Amino acid sequence: MKLTLIVPCYNEEGNILPLYNKVKETFEEKITDYEFVFINDGSTDRTGAILAALVKTADIPMKVVNFSRNFGKESGIYAGLHYADGEYICVMDGDLQQNPSFLLEMTGYLDDHPDCDCVAAYQENRSESPALIFFKDGFYKIINKISDTEFVMGASDFRTFRRNVAETILNMPEYHRFSKGIFSWVGFNTHYIPYQADDRLTGTTKWSFLKLWKYAFEGILAFSTKPLELPFWGGLGLTGIGLLRTAVAAAKKDDSGKTNGLIALIGGLNMAATGIAGIYLSKTYVQSKGRPVYIAKSVLTNRK
Ligand code: UDP
Ligand code: MG
């Protein structure tokens, strides 16, 4: 199997058949050996029924994974990787915002560049509200400062990658998944291509501002332990200030200054102690994710 298309769907009843037809029409003779893996993520509309009917009549290999409830797109992508048989694997949305013609470009690039492992699309011009752009830009600035993993502005989950990338990601069973970070964390050679997202064919976005906010927070927690370590450094600073203040006040025989200094000193020591616990907790947290200790892309040897 050359290509697997993973399509996470949550209430996409009006988009499934148009998507299926558009992919077929776009691929025609250009890509013939491909399959669909649709994830029905606990949809409450007719998505499940439409997929069940489609899988019976489709002339393209297809798997439909029906979740028991809504688990979120990230879980959908992970499940899709489990069921994918393709040499190349693509994640695309079920609302036709991403034109399947980009898949020809992505797979073509992988064909022509054996050293490239992943082709990811990023939105060059975003037709989002200024408030949303401000919020997203702020998120990328913050996370790139506090995380060792690089987050590329505007990069989406719309990407096509080789099996080795998929298998590596399958080995990362962390529960709170943040794909943008995971794709970046695993490394491999990624080529970015610009794309313009179309409007949703039917239905509405599943992202409210509150959901986006929570998602951004999730990303920071999943890829940085700095918030847990912050009290240690803050506490250290406060301890230093408290010490200095106490010493200066003692020299000046300023009793109230000494009291203030001692309060800062005790507060600082307390905070630093909490921070030390935070540092230990951050190590445990990272360990508990069970991420691979290393990822070897290939091993060369001259032995037979
Ligand atoms: N989706 C999903 N589970 C969810 C939310 C969304 O599988 O809980 C799917 C959705 O059906 C779509 C894709 O994820 O195929 C992207 O969602 P959406 O279009 O709402 O996001 P946007 O394009 O607005 O960022
Ligand atoms: Mg969408």
Image (tube, rainbow, N blue to C red):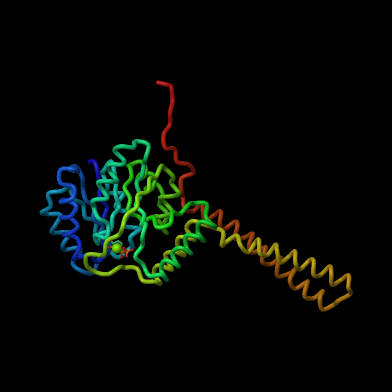
Using residue 153 as the reference point, say whether residue 63 is left or right of it.
left
**Residue at the spot 37% in from the left edge and 36% down from the top edge:** 115
Q: Is residue 29 left or right of residue 303?
A: left
* Image region (quadrant) for ligand 1: bottom left
Number of labels in the image equals 0
Q: Which residue is located at x 56 percent, y 53 percent?
A: 283
Picture quadrant of residue 72: bottom left
Quadrant position of residue 197: bottom left
Vertical comparison of 109 with 177: above or below: above
Residue 248 position within the rendered picture, expressed as x and y whole percent measured from the top left:
84, 69
Residue 91, percent across and down? 30, 52
State the residue lying farthest toward the top. Answer: 304
Report the quarter where the C terminus lies: top left
Q: Position of residue 63 (x, y in %)?
A: 21, 52
Residue occupying the far bottom of the picture: 256
> Which residue is at a point 33% across and 45% down the rendered structure image?
161
